[in-house]
Amino acid sequence: MTEHEHVRVAVIGSGFGGLGAAVRLRREGVTDFVVLERAGSVGGTWRDNSYPGCACDVPSHLYSFSFAPNPDWPRTFSGQEHIRAYLEHVTDTFGLRPHLRLNSEVKLMTWDIERLRWVIETSSGTLTADLVVSATGPLSDPKTPDVPGLDIFPGKVFHSARWDHDYDLRGKRVAMVGTGASAIQIVPAIQPEVAKLTLFQRTPPWVMPRMDRAVSGAERLLHRTLPVTARLRRGLLWGIRELQVQAFTKRPNELGLVEQIARRNMFRAVKDPGLRAKLTPSYRIGCKRILLSSTYYPALAKPNVDVVASGLREVRGSTVVAADGSEAEVDAIVFGTGFHVTDMPIADRVVGAEGRTLAEAWSASGMRSLRGATAAGFPNWMTIIGPNTGLGNSSMILMIESQLNYMADYVRQLDVLGGRAALDARPAAVDAWNDRVQRRMERTVWSTGGCNSWYLDENGVNTTVWPGTTTEFRGATRHVDLAEYDLIRPPVPTPTRTPAPESEPESGFVPASAAQSATPAARTKKKAEAEA
């Protein structure tokens, strides 16, 4: 890119959220945009996570864009390589490559209050944009614990999201730290080839059987020939998960049957009572993310695997020491310890209208946004998969597409307002939205299930999950309500002799209600919403 290039929209990230935003912008007739990507190719988390056994735990036909169905998914639950290939296909099909700015990591985004635009400093140059759509995602920056002695460990150390494919694990003694979604896929993939595998487990997960199989050639031919069959398949997968939401959000006690299925999944593979005791959770299923695997428990029952029911406390040379005092000699340490979800690193790089970073704005109350998209004090800045948009039982692509609807209407509203304009979420609107979300959260399994999950921030507040159905979220993000925003115009210079009119504040802020009543389209929308 050239220095100080200006675009209408800058999209950050090229995973599902970023590519989806790019497609939606083109479909809205917006072509003056770029997609800034720190890596050398698209794919987001499906590019970064290439560890052995990496696959999706959402059915393939639901884990894809509704506007880009894929009739040729090879398995009911697709692997990382197939999902990444799908994203490359979307990039080519919708002509997104001219918009890509690869190897362009965003270093800093600063709101220019005079020109009403964002100044974006990247590793490949500086540009400005009227609107920023941040789609970096919550699973983009790995979290590695600060373990004493790790810096002088003589062996190999890496995170599951930064897998070292040049390091051969065959015949090695390996420590696997963590028992999350990545770890339960890695363990059965590497167990047959390592000499010894020591699994450090702070909290056992609930693991349901994974009903994965190859999609037959006849099925794929049917979906290609009659696309409606693929849509019906997707609709059925979606509907089942919508019906399950009530148990997670309102009636957690109904999840007892699901727990029994998970217990049977373990009991079939694990015969040792002592190992069963280690692997049996003490919290309600669903409180932490429910994992899917039919190979995890059989791998743990193998003689070359040792399950340590404790976290990793320290490293002494080549010896790893658990919190319970047990020790093991290892050649490599693999961390499957998750990501910075409730403290998104991108927030440190966004400087808003008041000169504060987004991280500073969230430091007291935790991550807060309006409808999972916008934050007070950060005009014309949106996030895809923002606070409280995560799901516990369905496809995040559904939530992403809902947020793309919101983004599209945001762009339309700026067009209707005309001229140089920006929208800034009103603090009262942000507070009202988050208060409603947190009130609903009180009854959910994530709050009442008796666990400490990565859904919660350091204050114990769930700033991650959406406490409702995807249908509800779709309705809440269908349109931008201008009453929830302040309209910002360029500051009006104060005349040297004639005082500025009292009715026009020097700050350039215009009450959102005035902006809404100023346009026929907005008045029509407001009337329709009132009647609804």
Image: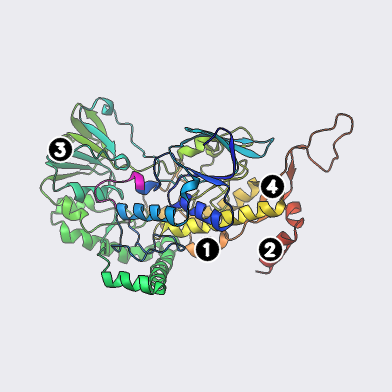
Residue that numbered label 4 is attached to: 486
| Mark found first going from the N terminus, 2 or 4 | 4
Amino acid at the residue labelled 4 = Asp
Q: Position of residue 516 (x, y in %)?
A: 73, 55
Q: Quadrant of residue 256?
A: bottom left
* Image coords of residue 469 (percent x, y): 47, 63
Q: Could you say which is closer to the camera, residue 289 or residue 332?
A: 332
For label 1, the residue is: 472
Q: CA distance from mark 3 to mark 1?
A: 49 Å
- Tell me the distance, in whole angstroms, between the alpha carbons under discs 2 and 4: 18 Å
Distance between mark 3 and mark 4 Cα atoms:
59 Å
Q: Could you say where residue 417 lies in the image, as x and y percent from the top left?
A: 71, 52
Question: Tag 2, which secondary structure?
Answer: helix
Q: Which residues are magenta?
A: 47-56
Residue 525 numbered mark, or none: 2
Mark with earlier residue (3, 1): 3
Residue on which disc 3 sits = 173
| Coloration mode | rainbow
3 and 1 marks in contact (CB < 8 Å)? no
